[in-house]
Amino acid sequence: MHLSRSLLSLHLVAAAAAAAVLLPTSPSLSQPIPPSQDAWYTAPSGWNGSAPGTILRIRQAPGNLTSEAQIANASAAYNILYRTTDSHFQPSWAVTTLFIPKTEYLSPSGRLALLSFQFAYDSADVDSSPSYGIYNDLAVTVPSLGVPSQTATINLALGNGWFVQTPDFEGPQAAFGAVVQEGHATLDAQRAVLSLAKTVLAVEPDKVTVALWGYSGGSVATAAAAELQVQYAPELTLAGAASGGLVTNLSTTLDGFNGSAIAGDLVSSVLGLMAEYPAADAYIRSRLVPATAAKFLGTYNRTLLNATAYWDNVDVYSYFIGGREDLFNSSVMKKIFAYDTVLGVYGVPTTPLYFYKAVGDEYCPVRETDALVNQYSATNPDITYQRNTVGGHVDELINGQPGAFEWLWGIFNESHIPLAACSIQNVTVNISSTNS
Ligand SMILES: *[C@@H]1O[C@H](CO)[C@@H](O)[C@H](O)[C@H]1NC(C)=O
Ligand SMILES: *[C@@H]1O[C@H](CO)[C@@H](O)[C@H](O)[C@H]1NC(C)=O
Ligand SMILES: *[C@@H]1O[C@H](CO)[C@@H](O)[C@H](O)[C@H]1NC(C)=O
Ligand SMILES: *[C@@H]1O[C@H](CO)[C@@H](O)[C@H](O)[C@H]1NC(C)=O
Ligand SMILES: *[C@@H]1O[C@H](CO)[C@@H](O)[C@H](O)[C@H]1NC(C)=O
Ligand SMILES: *[C@@H]1O[C@H](CO)[C@@H](O)[C@H](O)[C@H]1NC(C)=O
Ligand SMILES: *[C@@H]1O[C@H](CO)[C@@H](O)[C@H](O)[C@H]1NC(C)=O
Ligand SMILES: *[C@@H]1O[C@H](CO)[C@@H](O)[C@H](O)[C@H]1NC(C)=O
Ligand SMILES: *[C@@H]1O[C@H](CO)[C@@H](O)[C@H](O)[C@H]1NC(C)=O
Ligand SMILES: *[C@@H]1O[C@H](CO)[C@@H](O)[C@H](O)[C@H]1NC(C)=O
Ligand SMILES: *[C@@H]1O[C@H](CO)[C@@H](O)[C@H](O)[C@H]1NC(C)=O
């Protein structure tokens, strides 16, 4: 059995009344506007009384996002603004972008495939949120870093016939680093899209296989969602979660960022935590070297690639009066680092898991992923973990991609057999051109 496009269209016609309300047929904006200047990125009044995952606004994605030059394998794209819950467990909202494939894949048992792809958008600037970043920073390759276009991955997933959604999981404050916020927003994005599928396509949630995927900055949101799901979204069935280049413990990773090609990530994650935590904001401002404080804080207005270029190889700790210890030896920051920037503390994912990591990862040490896999596997043995002996963090973004696609295919086509024991392999995969 195969769900043809016309059949899907029939569903759309059958639900025309709801569709007319929920799915606008033409873009409301001919060009995207940065979220900081786009009034659409505000919640309607009374929003905070709604349940997590409730759709608050929906529009067709601005401009020609699905044109040949951009996400060509999508037939349509929608921005959905939905209710979520921040790191303080207070009502918040976020936006996800849902891409419709040109031809839908249907599994042997008649399920659609929904991939939630968490971008590594690593920024405290709300204008780097994926719903806007897909038009610029996330669409380009960065030869100096060896980073490929992240939207190219989405195109491939859509080409498989998978629906794809890409949540702005850092939320309206761009709280980069705040793991609980990121996990909640990722889970609520699934709720929002599943409710849309039910209303518009008359497809019940159990006819959609949901899998999550993210690398690096996107891996945190992915793994956090898998950990938090058990308690925060128990009604949701996740069929699998794939995390590459996992950032298990931000504290360790910040030391790796300092002075590196992505030192901007250190600045942006401190700013992201300041945005989420007023106490951190007051404390960090009091510890910034006055002469350079404006430069540090100005990074709130630097998008991903702008900040990366600006902070290239900078000794970020020198921006603090007391150096590195200002960040790590403060009671305010210690608490945040312990409760909102580490994995392995919210719960054990019950879903099948796939991890891939370069043994030589210079930012997020492989030993930490080894430890997390070991911790999870005592409760959930359905873990496939590929340790690549080739390359570093950025190389693995490319080298690990085919393996992740293959594992996700197994989830979507229902061939994945639950593992009774965790499968850890040392592999040698070298397809990236930047390996040294
Ligand atoms: C929820 O909305 C009400 C009224 O709009 C407001 O007074 C309250 O502060 C809001 N709560 C949060 C957590 O935003
Ligand atoms: C979008 O596509 C329409 C029709 O194909 C075209 O007229 C318009 O110029 C395009 N806009 C941009 C920004 O490319
Ligand atoms: C679209 O998907 C097909 C696979 O079906 C793939 O070969 C093609 O490269 C994808 N297009 C883009 C622009 O990535
Ligand atoms: C995270 O890393 C820091 C620094 O490496 C360490 O002090 C802390 O104990 C780690 N936290 C966890 C939960 O492993
Ligand atoms: C931060 O990076 C600089 C290199 O830019 C290095 O000299 C310094 O020792 C690093 N600081 C710490 C605490 O590791
Ligand atoms: C960022 O830009 C906005 C608008 O231009 C400005 O109001 C704000 O002060 C800037 N923030 C920082 C930290 O520079
Ligand atoms: C980078 O961001 C700064 C601060 O907002 C802005 O002044 C500058 O024009 C940006 N540079 C580029 C190349 O976008
Ligand atoms: C950390 O802070 C404590 C108390 O505030 C202080 O005694 C200690 O010397 C500090 N450690 C470092 C390495 O700065
Ligand atoms: C990976 O392949 C490239 C050529 O494509 C080669 O230059 C490099 O040495 C290889 N790296 C490793 C670790 O084998
Ligand atoms: C399902 O996916 C797996 C993993 O990629 C693949 O080996 C298998 O051939 C696929 N089966 C079908 C029926 O497509
Ligand atoms: C993978 O390699 C490490 C050394 O890097 C070794 O300690 C470990 O036993 C190997 N694991 C497997 C499953 O072969």
Image (cartoon, helix red, strand yellow):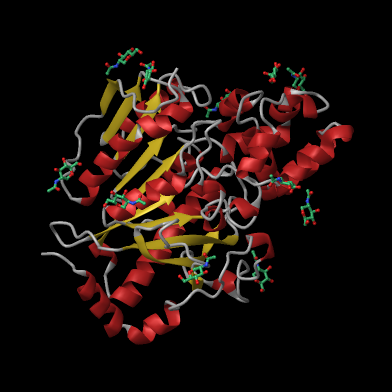
Q: Which residue: 69% across, 27% down?
A: 328
Q: Horizontal and vertical percent for residue 258?
A: 65, 25
Q: Position of residue 107 (x, y in %)?
A: 17, 57
Q: Is residue 380 visible?
A: no
Q: Is residue 366 left or right of residue 293?
A: left
User: On the rendered structure, is 154 left or right of 180?
Assistant: left
Evaluate whether residue 434 shows in this view. Answer: yes
- Residue at the limit of the structure toward the bottom, as seen here: 17
Q: Position of residue 14 (x, y in %)?
A: 27, 84
The answer to whether residue 254 is left or right of residue 67 is right
299 up-or-down from 54: above or below = above
Q: Could you tell me which residue is drawn at 29 percent across and 63 percent down?
A: 102
Image quadrant holding the N terminus, namely bottom left
Quick one: 377 or 405, which is closer to the camera?
A: 405
Q: How many numbered dots are placed on residues in this image? A: 0
Q: Residue at x 44, y 59 (%)?
A: 189
